[in-house]
Image (cartoon, rainbow, N blue to C red):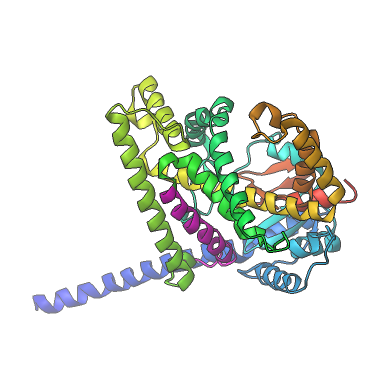
Amino acid sequence: MDFEFAAIASVPWSYLLYGLLCCVLLWQAGLLLDRLWWRPRRLERTLRAQGIGGTPYRFLIGDLKDFGRLNDEAWARPLPLRCHDIVPRVTPFLYNNVRDHGKPCFSWFGPVANVTITDPELVKDVLSNKFGHFEKPQFPALTKLLANGLTTHEGEKWVKHRRILNPAFHLEKLKLMLPAFSASCEELVSRWKEFHGSDGSCEVDVWPELQNLTGDVISRTAFGSSYLEGRRIFQLQSEQAKLFVGAVQRIVIPGYLFLPTRNNRKMRKNNNEVESILRGLIGKRMQAMEEGKTSEGDLLGLLLESNRRDIDENGQPSQGMKMEDVIEECKLFYLAGMETTSVLLTWTMIVLSMHPEWQDLAREEVLGLFERNKPHYEGLSRLKIVTMILHEVLRLYPSATVFSRKTYKDMDIGGVRYPTGVFIEVPVLFINHDPDI
């Protein structure tokens, strides 16, 4: 009788448990549906009501499918030589969206509204936080695989890392790195001289050559005598950057980065190897500092010295960077200086080949200042024509095509009210080529 009673009494509890589970699942499903459908639809109506045009929202993927399709179509066609009109080729989706919907306009990065602002005054105000603080869009799982350093930090962590990193980039410290720059360049030119044929000319694919040059320079200036180990980091980070681009378009799929895809496995393997090499380099350098050995004057040594000084001044080890923080900043050294500089150098050579008269003027200026001697820092600042050329190449072929910020609350920008969670896109390449500007 007692057993029968216990069995009967347990039935309502099981129903209650199932009922609670169903409620939780329904609640989670409602939140997911709101994030992936109702909220984007409300955002679209809000933006259109204020006179901003854009693409209609499509469930989950937004405009990512069209983005990829237009890129494939644009990149399949060759670009005519001596043509600098690269916006329709490099950012075809953005180009079409502005053409069809005007300035500003919006599109969809998955379920997130992406508003493109092209007015230079508004851009300056956004980047200077005149309208209030804008957050940096965060993709923690993906960023950790590439470089989670100063450029992704916010608030107090950004302030601390900026304070510790600043001494390493002081002008006087950078001047001391000129011999490393010079050594890498001399090795490159010497190798090119060996390529000469019987007629004194040769054909060189400068893109991989200049990628190796910038990787070598970063390795020497970041890790000093350990730069050969640094070269391996350069190779891995180069591959990681390419894999990163492929992952960005799929990151809107919940849990995508945790799927055992070939791309994801390769990114994790590369990241583990990079972090292993860096942990060994940093550990050796920290041990040498504890033994009283002097710094090599490279970025890693300067960073560790500044970090130790910051800890001593504050009297708290927790105030400095941890080993993981130093590793991420070292990964960022490569990411920030690798592609950006090699892209600039490559396009500079291409554009000078298109305009040999400017090539002659630049050569005359360099030889007039330095003759056949090695360039020195004081003379570099007096290169007016070379500086003009570099600035114009950066305008035509900027190393970064887009900057993004995110509203963390409702914000007014240029008379338009943008709700929380909207991406504000600054299309650098488009602005640099805009005939109205």
**Is 184 covered by the magenta stretch?**
no
Residue 125, x across and y down, in percent: 74, 37
Tag count: 0
Residue 218, x across and y down, in percent: 52, 44
Q: Can residue 78 be seen in this snapshot?
A: yes
Residue 314, x across and y down, in percent: 38, 22
Q: Along the line of sight, which residue is nearer the eye, 211 or 71?
A: 211
* Residue that sits furthest to the front in the current view: 198
* Residue that sits furthest to the left in the current view: 1
Q: Is residue 147 left or right of residue 322?
A: right
Residue 119 in which image quadrant: top right
Residue 269, x across and y down, in percent: 40, 63
- What secondary structure do most residues of the magenta stretch adopt? helix
**Which residue is pictured at 65% across the width and 59% down the height?**
207
**Which residue is pictured at 62% across the width and 43% down the height?**
409
Which contiguous range is marked in magenta? 228-255
Look at the image and tell me in which quarter the C terminus lies.
top right
State whether residue 4 is above or below residue 282: below
* Residue that sits furthest to the right in the current view: 436
Q: Is residue 278 left or right of residue 29?
A: left
Look at the image and tell me in which quarter the N terminus lies.
bottom left
**Is 234 covered by the magenta stretch?**
yes
State whether residue 409 is above or below residue 298: below
Q: Along the line of sight, which residue is nearer the eye, 400 or 411?
A: 400
Q: Along the line of sight, which residue is nearer the eye, 205 or 302?
A: 205
Q: Can residue 91 be seen in this snapshot?
A: no
